[in-house]
Amino acid sequence: MAKEAKKDLSEISVEEKLKSLYKLQTILSEMDKIKTLRGELPLEVRDLEDEISGLNTRIEKIKAEIEELKQNVATRKIDIETAKVSIEKYKAQQDNVRNNREYDVLTKEIEFQSLEVELNEKRIKEANASIKAKEEEIVKSQNALEETKKDLEDKKNELEEIVAETKQEEEKLRENAKAIESGIEPRLLQAFKRIRSNSRNGLGITYVQRGACGGCFNKIPAQRQLDIKMRKKIIVCEYCGRIMVDQELAGVAPTDTEVKEAPKTTRRRAASSQED
Ligand SMILES: [Zn+2]
């Protein structure tokens, strides 16, 4: 079987080879389009998942900070109470002092404890303001989280839909491509794939368009255009290396004013294709 197939391949005319390559190009471009369509969605889904995990971490962190601040406030409240009890105790002791020195020592203690109370009250006020700000931050983060979760849901659904929609089409294209590839000489196929992978628009074969290469838009000499029309040799564009065919072979109406039914990919300006 394999031997026979190989023998058949060597008997294929250049014209047939070019037709096969062009057909393969069309199918591969279709597959690229599907991949592009889907290609960005998994990335967007991952970005959103990262964002959600980031927001969750952020919310947890703020919650922990609030908890710490609240404990700090509670400790300071106890300290205030303790200081106040001390103040009361010192005041009572002042009524029973034996001399001025003892009285002054107690006054100093009372002053010190009063300052402690004031300082703690100031710190509590600051902590409460900080708690309030952090709680507002949590609300904001939670709103952002909800929104991102909704976005993620949408993107996931979109991706699932596209995958479901395109799966069959993609499989069919892949089968077609495989069938065509099996009818092309491995060396030619390899060369074609190399040209294709080197070209940014994924075109390994293109047709003459208004006297120029449909891939890089460089002018093709008249004699070369004639050779391409003859379909007796595989001719590549001397600028971009793409394999050249005539419009008729490409299934494009031969017109010099407008390109009809051109494969979508060739309509894009391929300025980037001038690799060398
Ligand atoms: Zn070219």
Image (tube, rainbow, N blue to C red):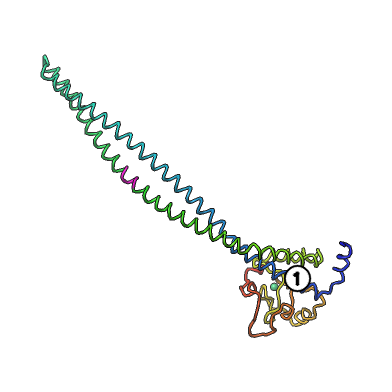
User: Residues in magenta?
Assistant: 131-135
Residue depicted at 66% across the width and 73% down the height = 216
Using the rendered view, name the quadrant where residue 270 is placed: bottom right
24 displayed left or right of 260? right
Using the rendered view, name the quadrant where residue 129 is placed: top left
Q: Find residue 163 and report its horizontal and vertical position in percent.
A: 60, 60
Q: Find residue 197 and report its horizontal and vertical position in percent.
A: 69, 63
Q: In which quarter of the image is the C terminus?
A: bottom right
Q: Nearer the viewer, residue 34 or 212?
A: 34
Q: Nearer the viewer, residue 221 or 83?
A: 83
Q: Label 1: few (<14), some or many (≥20) within 10 Å?
A: many
Q: How many marks?
A: 1
Q: In this picture, is 276 found above or below 51?
A: below
276 displayed left or right of 119? right
Q: In which quarter of the image is the N terminus?
A: bottom right
Residue under label 1, please give it: 21
Res 276 seen here: no
| Outermost top residue | 98
The secondary element bearing badge 1 is classed as helix
41 displayed left or right of 63? right
SS assignment for the magenta stretch, majority: helix
Q: Find residue 68 and report its horizontal and vertical position in percent.
A: 36, 36
Residue depicted at 82% across the width and 66% down the height = 185
What amino acid type is highlighted by mark number 1? Answer: Leu
| Quarter holding ligand 1 | bottom right
Q: Find residue 247 and report its horizontal and vertical position in percent.
A: 71, 80
Res 110 seen here: yes
Q: In this picture, is 272 found above or below 99?
A: below
Residue 132 is one of the magenta-drawn residues: yes
Using the rendered view, name the quadrant where residue 201 is placed: bottom right
